[in-house]
Image (cartoon, grey):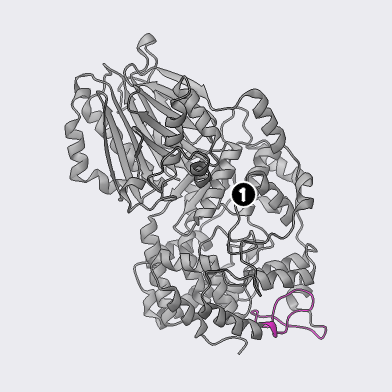
Amino acid sequence: MCGIFGVVTAVGAEIDKARLRTLTRDLFVLSESRGQEASGLAMVTDGQIRVLKRATPAAKLLRSKEYRALWRTESDHRNGGGFAMIGHSRLVTNGVQTTHQNNQPVITHNTVGVHNGIVANVDDIWQRFPALQRQYEVDTEALLSLIRHFQASENSLAHAVRRSFQEIEGVANIAVVLEEFNELILATNNGSLYTATSPSNGSAGRQLTVFASEEYILRKILAGGRILPDTDLAIEHVVPNSGLLINLSCGAVQHFSLQRDTETLEHELNGARRTISDIAPGLSYRRAARPASAHGESDEAPPWLLDHYERNAERIAELDRCTRCVLPTTYPFIELDEDGVCNYCRHYQPFSFHGREALEKVVERYRRSDGKPDCLVALSGGRDSCNSLHYLTRELGLTPIAYTYDWGMVTDLARRNASRICAGLGLEHIIVSANIERKRTYIRKNVDAWLDKPDIGTVPLFMAGDKQFFWYAEQLKRKTGVELMVFAMNPLERTDFKHGFCGISGGGHNGLFFRLNWAKNLQIALYYARAYAKNRGYINSSLVDTAFAYFAYYVMPHNYTMFHDYIPWDEKEVEGVLDLYNWERSPDTRSTWRIGDGTAPLYNYIYYTIAGFTENDTFRSEQIRAGKMDRTVALERVNDENYPRWQSLKWYCDTIGIDVRRVIDAIHGVAKFYA
């Protein structure tokens, strides 16, 4: 997901070239937080369209000689001629940015457009419309091709856009210019689009229209009246499933709807209103797309990996385990009594949920009646965050903004699922994108250092880069003015063993995952200080980023509402909700958990190989203690879920630029807890 933005000035508009250039620069700079992997713009003057795009962040594009040259060619607007610009800051999803045609604006079939979102069914579109000729990898091409396709048979651009949106799954916010039309198309199915317009001047339309993916961007730009002095520009939300046609000569704006006809729409809404009880009973533990074999292993898994895994799996199967849960004796600080029951089971305290009524009382203080956003919801693209977004919207009637921090290890599958849920609910989605190339470099350096001197306690360094999530959540609350922030962390997903490998016993402080008391905070800091002293490879360019992560995770105040403090978690119910949105599963695991986190397959493989258990063991053990799963079923699940996810392991290593065989061999060279 990316940032789109632009400006349209009518013929005779009182805005000169210098102001337009400043406006374009500010739009680029403020939109860069939504994507830093590529950037580009298209200028439309006197019927001519000029496009510039590069696989660089916006800040670098703005300094380029090509960008300066592009502005030198624009002269008509200085004498009162009409002018339009559409721009893009890209977070790469479909289509690598190193292929020039994949970057935006996308040019196809005499159509130029920019797109924020993900068309999740892009391959299906190309199959269902064989007359469309695919040239690139980027999903935007499919949407633009559909618009052109339907435009040939429809009697208006608005109808063509409406038909095109009816064919796609996932979020789409677009700005499109068709070469022979003197109009700019703006359309959105989730509402991540805002406009700022000058007052209408009768039949002459509007002098100026500016648009961007976030309201904050427009508020920031308009502050101080620098664009049109002595003129108030009104910011308006382009509501979900609507669009605008802006005349590039007079600035006139025509609104249109993307909704289907009333009868079809009501039928779909009735389908979406199905209760979970209609769906959940038919659900079962899903089988992933593995070919049938002795263990159902992936067809891509190489023999050397399977040999490693099977040798260790035989020994791990012989480990003593708690007779009540499934934790093995290699778990940190575990003690079994004479009945074989572990101390974690003996001291287990059932979680007390506050209930729906209590949650309704909390949200009621923030609920708005004017349709504007009343809460922010953390959205990873994983199952629990998607489910919470559905519940808050459909069950409690809130208007959330979904928030995602993309640090480079959010999988494309998670991005597609986030797109599906936001499009299905018609919710604005704000993505804060890190400098992904830099983040992946940091990961590679820390993984390299770990491979030289493996230490199971420092494995969380691989995930340090995502902890700024909390920092940007606070920034987003300030920018949007929305005070209620909801997280959907599952209380059953305990990973206290990660602290245990650092010699720290017990769980988080006050039941929170990300909060340790001051003494344990100091312990973990000292553990890492010693690890850094022993392994100088960790002293690299990631140090500042890692320190920032520690502050954001362990030190910074966190004022959030935890969804599952109120609403009990049930796996079948959650998966039932996901089915409403055609939620996508991973091909290399039967589980729906952790499939959106690109790092999880590696660190769980490390924990399994060295210690004989993973997060899956702790999660299923918590389910047993909570009375949500039988121990026999849990053992079967754990045995299956701990199988190596080869496709994901390969993706991770390729993505950070490290040899997967070297990684796997190094892991298996570490002394085992169960040797």
- What residue occupies the far front of the structure in this picture? 131
Instruction: Give the quadrant of residue 15.
Output: top left
Q: Nearer the viewer, residue 652 or 539?
A: 652
Q: Is residue 509 above or below residue 20?
A: below
Give, as a three-letter code, the residue at label 1.
Trp
Q: Residues within 10 Å of mark 1 (few under 14, many from 20)?
A: many
Q: Is residue 487 left or right of residue 228?
A: right
- What residue occupies the far bottom of the structure in this picture? 675
Q: Is residue 214 visible?
A: no
Quadrant assignment for the N terminus: top left
Q: Is residue 386 above or below residue 532?
A: above
Q: Is residue 21 above or below residue 530?
A: above
- What residue occupies the far top of the structure in this picture? 203
Confirm whether the magenta stretch covers residue 218. no
Instruction: Give the quadrant of residue 581.
Output: top right
- Residue 246 is situated, as x and y percent measured from the top left of the image, at 39, 22
Residue at figure coordinates x 79%, y 75% from the top left: 324
Q: Is residue 673 visible?
A: yes
Q: Nearer the viewer, residue 183 or 91?
A: 183
Residue designated by label 1? 583
Residue range in magenta is: 317-339
SS at circle 1: loop
